Image (cartoon, rainbow, N blue to C red):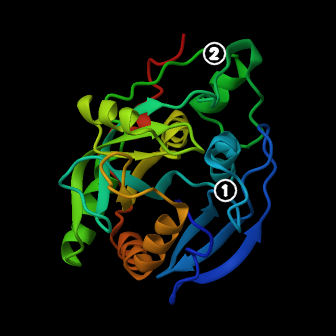
Amino acid sequence: MLGIIGGSGLYQIDGIKILDEIAIETPFGEPSDKYIITEYEGRKVVFLPRHGKGHKYPPHLINFRANIWGFRKLGVNKILSISAVGGINPSLKPGDFVISDQFIDFTKSRVQTFYEGVCSKNDDTEIKDEVSEFLKNKRVVHIDVTNPFCPEMRDVLIKVCDKNNFPFHQKCVYAATEGPRLETSAEIKFLGLIGADIVGMTLVPEIVLARELKMHFASISVVTNLAAGISQNRLTSDEVVEMMKEKNEQIKTVVLDFIENLPERFNCECENVLKGAAI
């Protein structure tokens, strides 16, 4: 089943039927909000507003572990992340879609694993798999993130954007920063020098935690503005909000086409990430 993480109201799209709203309790605390259970073209899809309805939580206070664990409890094994980012690469323009294929992590205070050895929480699901085994036995786990994004899901996103003639870039490096402040121009210059194309505050540890649970994960971002020092103007939250509103209909088209074209079976290694990863 597919889970989609994005802004509030993303699930309010013509053709998507809302079946239920479910509050989930997890060993890691409360998720950002209730999970919206929907159906589209005979497929169930679970939506979660990353920051909570009304944008209650800043990036550094999002309970990423609870969010991802809640998806697991609902049977989700694929996650599509939708977010706003700043553009670093000069080839990117505000309004462009970006389908990341790598990330660089500069977050500072976020818990990035479910597997904490002797401090691990117990699995409160009824799923019997490597995840439950590793948590029960207090294992320490080091997952491979050489290629962090699911190639099958990325391929669908690429085809969807191409079919709709949306401006997009399919090979980009996402630099994840702590926030909630925006970056300095010196930081952006440094990120550009080490290969970052875009900058945002939510991808990590979201993707890492999903991967730890053997989930397939892909990300599509909207370049809402040019990053500090590249833009000639003072950066504001207003321009981010306005650009996301402007792109709202295109984002909804991407979501519907993505759901319709997502294959039932994947030919990738995402679900094998825990093999040989535990000590």
The residue beneath circle 2 is: 139
**Viewer-proximal residue, 116 or 50?**
50
Query: Measured along the vertical axis of the image, is residue 218 above or below residue 148?
Result: below
Q: Residues within 10 Å of mark 1 (few under 14, many from 20)?
A: some
Return the residue nearer the eye: 75 or 83.
83
Q: Is residue 1 visible?
A: no
Left or right of residue 155, residue 144 in this image: right
Instruction: Count numbered badges in the picture.
Output: 2
Q: Is residue 144 left or right of residue 96?
A: right
Tell me the residue at 67%/56% (across/down). Answer: 74
In-front residue for pair 131/234: 234
The reply to whether residue 188 is visible in this rendering is: yes
Question: Which image quarter: residue 191?
Answer: top left
- In this figure, which residue is indicated by the disc labeled 1? 74
Marks 2 and 1, the one that precedes in the sequence:
1
What amino acid is labelled 1 in the image?
Answer: Leu
